[in-house]
Amino acid sequence: MSINRWRHRRQRGVTLVEVVLFIVIVGVASVGIMEVMRLTTQHSADPQLRKQALAIAEGMLEEIQLARFTFCDPLDPAAETAASPAACTIPEGPGQEAGGVPRPFDNVNDYVTAYGTPVAYATDAQGNAWAAGAGQQYIARVTITQEALNGLPATESLRIRVSVAYAPGEDIVLDGYRVRYAPNSIP
Ligand SMILES: [Ca+2]
């Protein structure tokens, strides 16, 4: 083999088969990368929706836990002295008693119409709707149940559950308790 011919062979470059193989490998690899990018972009808004739903649930739970839990309705003359619901003319129970105030309500149990039955809220305590943008609307579902807690009977302890959906099948669920520690506190 002469020097010239050897040089010619060395500078031949790549064959068509090699080029096609290269294209196929790069193509397959980029499909995988594109798929990862597509998934990332698709779910990039989720953390924000989740955070908003969490803030709404926390706000709603706090509003309810800060409400009073008295034996009598605040309008009852015996509200500040009654030692049990039996001593009230208007005992407190689920739902708004006559002459009740708008939100924030005057008692924890005013937030539901019956224990164990969820009630949907679309606004905060000031009446502002929780908008999620693009025509979406957050709804907070509130369920209150009488539940014994650490030796306290179920009549003196309420479990409050707030559930806020932020995507199909995805909910923020927060639980809290409110016990009757100041049964005669009427400001
Ligand atoms: Ca009530």
Image (cartoon, rainbow, N blue to C red):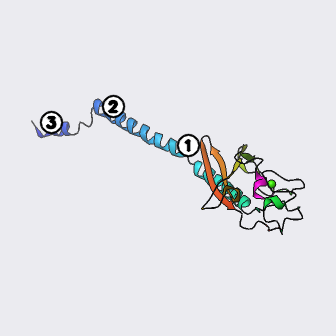
Q: Which amino acid type corresponds to the residue marked 1 in the rendered image?
A: Gln
**Magenta stretch, main secondary structure class:** loop
Instruction: Give the magenta part as a residue range.
Output: 103-112
Badge 1 vs badge 2, beta-carbon distance below 8 Å: no
- Which numbered mark, 1 or 3, is in the foreground of this view? 1
Q: Where does ligand 1 appear, by image quarter?
A: bottom right
Rendering coords of residue 125 (x, y %): 78, 57
Q: Amino acid at mark 3?
A: Arg
3 in the magenta segment? no
Question: Mark 1 and mark 3: span between their CA atoms?
Answer: 57 Å
Q: Please report the residue visible at 67 percent of the width from the left and 54 percent of the height from the top.
A: 160
> Quadrant location of the C terminus?
bottom right
Mark 1 / mark 3, whichever is N-terminal: 3
- Helix, strand or loop under label 2: helix
* Neighbour tally class for label 2: few under 14, some 14-19, many 20 plus, Cα within 10 Å: few
Tell me the residue that label 1 is attached to. Answer: 42
Residue 128 visible to an observer of this rendering = no
Q: Which residue is mark 2?
A: 20
Q: Which residue in the structure is indicated by mark 3? A: 5
Mark 3 surroundings within 10 Å by alpha-carbon count, few (fewer than 14), some (14 through 19), many (20 or more): few
Q: CA distance from mark 1 to mark 2?
A: 33 Å
